[in-house]
Amino acid sequence: MAREKGRKLVAQNRRARHDYHIDDTYEAGIVLTGTEVKSLRAGRASLIDGFAQVKDGEVWLENVHIPEYAQGTWTNHSARRPRKLLLHREEIARLIGKTQEAGRTLVPLSLYFSEGHAKVEIALARGKRSYDKRRDIAEREAKRDMERALRRRR
């Protein structure tokens, strides 16, 4: 079987960019079972309510929903089990230090296949306050209105 080329997006967490200030992003491999891979290849996953945490020097992806594979048998996986993330030792050490600061968390931004391997993009993030969200929305609308006005003038 030929190796896949490029990047195939499976799931994206748009809400994370709305709810958090993204400080740093990391690409991590993910340890999956066979039926989870088949379910992801079918394009089925949800990153909503997902988060990552560091336990005993390892990073775990929690509460990410990968539904059971439809043609799976008794070997099928549970949908919300914790999944181990594969990162370099230095990256894990950096994450341990930064997540212990107040208000920092690890959130998954996207889940995709890169060169045939399942990857997850996680972000070190700080929670936004409601007034920050309102300001971001106002800035986005102002930018959109300016672009509309410029288009009308041309």
Image (cartoon, rainbow, N blue to C red):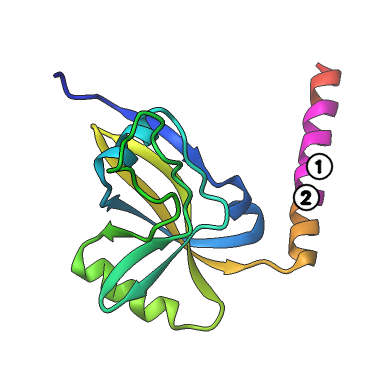
Q: Nearer the viewer, residue 63 or 25?
A: 63
- Distance, label 2 to label 1, CA atoms, is 6 Å
Residues in magenta?
A: 138-149
Q: Which residue is mark 1?
A: 141
Residue drawn where x is 31% and y is 36% of the image:
73
Toward the top, the furthest residue is: 154
- Tag 1: residue type? Glu
Query: Dot 1 lies on which element?
Result: helix
Q: Residue at x 73, y 69 (%)?
A: 129
Q: List the residue tagged with mark 2.
A: 137
Marks 2,1: beta carbons within 8 A: yes
- Please identify the quarter of the rendering in which residue 72 is found: top left
Q: Badge 1: few (under 14), some or many (20 or more) residues near its Cα, within 10 Å?
A: few
Report the side of 30 relative to 131 (left or right).
Answer: left
Residue pushed farthest front? 74
Amino acid on which disc 2 is placed:
Ile
Examine the image and state in which quarter residue 36 appears: top left
Q: Is residue 3 above or below residue 28?
A: above
Classified by dominant secondary structure, the portion drawn in magenta counts as: helix
> Where does the C terminus fall, quadrant-wise?
top right
